[in-house]
Each structure stands twice: as structure tokens, then as C-alpha cells.
Image (spheres, rainbow, N blue to C red):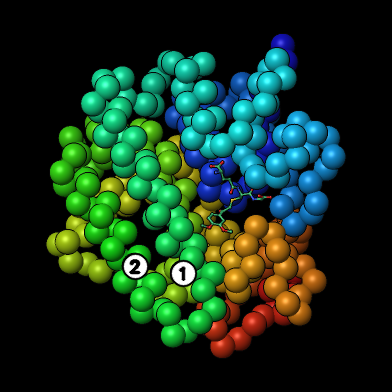
Amino acid sequence: MTRATLYHLPVCPFCQRIEIQIALKGLRERFDFHPVDISQPRPGWLLEKTQGTTALPVLETADGRIVKESLVIMQYLEDTHPDRPMAQRDPWRRAVEGMLTAMGGDFVGQGYGWLMNQDRGRRDALRDGMLRQYAQLDGFLRRHAQGDIFLFEDFGWAEAAFTPFFQRFWFLAYYEDFTLPDTPDYARVRRWIDACVAHPAAQQTSREEIVKLYYDYSQGSGNGAIPAGRNRSSMAFAPPWQNRPWPPRDKYGHHATDAELGL
Ligand code: GAZ
């Protein structure tokens, strides 16, 4: 039997959404995972499948159809593998998780915008903006959550969409000293985040991998681009991140060389 293939970048949060879903549904054996090195040009055969777009994840179904966009792939897998449903079935509940998921765009933009910022003078404003994002999530959960931990009874659709970014934002703790204040106004979202990042289906990456691979983002270079004065991307597959030293935490004052990063 031909199997479906997920083309993914190992540390890409959008790809991790699908990896979480596959783990939750117990479908690991039904998919081939094809890692793509973001620091290299895309191979021609892959560009042909995607009609020239380069963003991942990309799902190729067993019969050769191509599905792009992480949330669209999630819906497709939900519809084609309805066992162990991840999305809510009740229309109102589905709308609630949809509204929460839609808040992810601004949340992600704020966090990555802060990591990639190179102007020390903007730090306080970026921290305030990040806190506003967490406060909005907190308010949404206090209004709509049915349970005390997740949005509904269990880790579901919204959790699969957000968790990769809760984990990516460990880079803000490392490079920007950001932690969510331990105050009542963030208590609800903090419970959600803590349970999300600890969930057994969401253990595809680690704080160490994220901090090391996202060094170039902290220097303002995203998506496999290489910062000035360097020759190798921190997102490269080799040498393996386990063998590299922890990068310098001062992203503004010092720009590490390939050698300092173990590249
Ligand atoms: N909307 C798509 C989806 O599937 O949901 C987004 C997929 C995507 O952006 N994938 C990235 C990719 O393949 C890797 S993850 N890039 C290579 C390419 O050739 O396009 C980066 C950001 C950012 C937020 C997230 C990411 C990220 O800024 O993690 O800025 C550079 C990329 C808000």
C-alpha cells in the first residue's frame, strides 16, 4: 500500500502541529516523514509537487494529491481519519476553538517579531506587546474554557495549533529574558501552557534544540537565511544540534561566528 508522506522541517512549528495530530490519533505508522533542510535550496521534485511554493509542511496523500497549509492539513487529516477526533463536533464548541486558533496569528507574529528585533530600544514595547497577547489568551480561556486546564476536556485542536509556539517561545526566555509574570492575570493561560507543553503527544522537540536552531532568528535572519559575516545556518542539519555549544544569550551586543556556534 502506498503511504501518505509529510514533508517537514524538523523544528518547524507548523509542521509540529501535524506531528502532534498524528501522534494523538495514533497514526504514526501510516505516514512517511520526509525531512527537508531549510538551509538548502528546495529540490526541483518538491517544487514541482508544490507548484513552486517553498513553505512547509506539505502533505502528499497516498494517491499523490498535495495539501498545503498546516491548519488545512489538520482539517484534512481530521476528515480522513475521524477516529479519535481532535476537533469539536458541536458547532458552537467548534466556533470557540476556531476563535481561539485564529488568535494564534497575532500571537505568533508578536513572538517572532520580538525574537527577530535588532533594536534594543524597542525591547520594552515588544515585551508589553507580548504580555498583551498572553492577557488576551487568558481572557479568552476565562470566558470560554469548559475545563480547568485545556479549552475543553482534553488536549485538542486549539492545543495542537498553539503548543508548538508555546515551545518555540522558550527562545524569548533565553534571548530576551522573558517570563510570564507570576500574577493572577496570567494564571489561567499559564495553566494551559504548562499542560500543553508537557503533553505526551507534543514532545517532538526540546528547549535546547529550539534555542540552538533559532540563533539566526535572534540575529534577524529567518527561514534559513544566513546572518552577515556567517557561512552556515543555525538551522542546518549538520553538525547535529546536540554537539553544538549553547549560543551566547546576548543577541544584541555580540554576533556569534560559525565556530562559536559549533557550525
Ligand atoms: N501558513 C503556513 C502553514 O503551514 O501554516 C506557514 C508555514 C511556514 O511558514 N513554514 C516555514 C517554511 O517552510 C517554516 S516555519 N519556511 C520556508 C519557506 O521557504 O517558506 C517564521 C517567521 C514567523 C513566524 C514563524 C516562522 C516559522 O514570523 O516558524 O518569520 C520568518 C517558519 C511571524
Is residue 195 shown left or right of residue 220? Answer: left
- Please report whichever mark, 2 or 1, sits nearer to the chain's N-terminal start: 1
The N terminus is located in which quarter?
top right
Q: Residue at x 46, y 22 (%)?
A: 78
In the structure shown, which secondary structural element does the residue marked by tag 2 occupy? helix
**Which amino acid lies under the numbered mark 2 shown in the image of this protein?**
Gly
Return the x and y of residue 15 as percentages of the image width and height.
Answer: 57, 41
Q: Residue furthest right?
A: 44
Return the x and y of residue 248 as percentages of the image width and height.
Answer: 58, 79
Return the x and y of residue 134 as percentages of the image width and height.
Answer: 29, 58
The C terminus is located in which quarter?
bottom right
Q: Which mark is residue 127?
A: none
- State the residue position of label 1: 114
Residue 179, can we see it? Answer: no
- State the residue position of label 2: 129
Splitting the image into 4 quarters, where does residue 232 fall?
A: bottom right
Label 2 close to label 1 by CB (< 8 Å): yes
In the structure shown, which secondary structural element does the residue marked by tag 1 occupy? helix
Splitting the image into 4 quarters, where does residue 253 fall?
A: bottom right
Is residue 245 shown left or right of residue 108? Answer: right
Q: Residue furthest top?
A: 1
Q: Residue furthest front?
A: 51
Residue 228 versus residue 261: which sits nearer the camera?
228
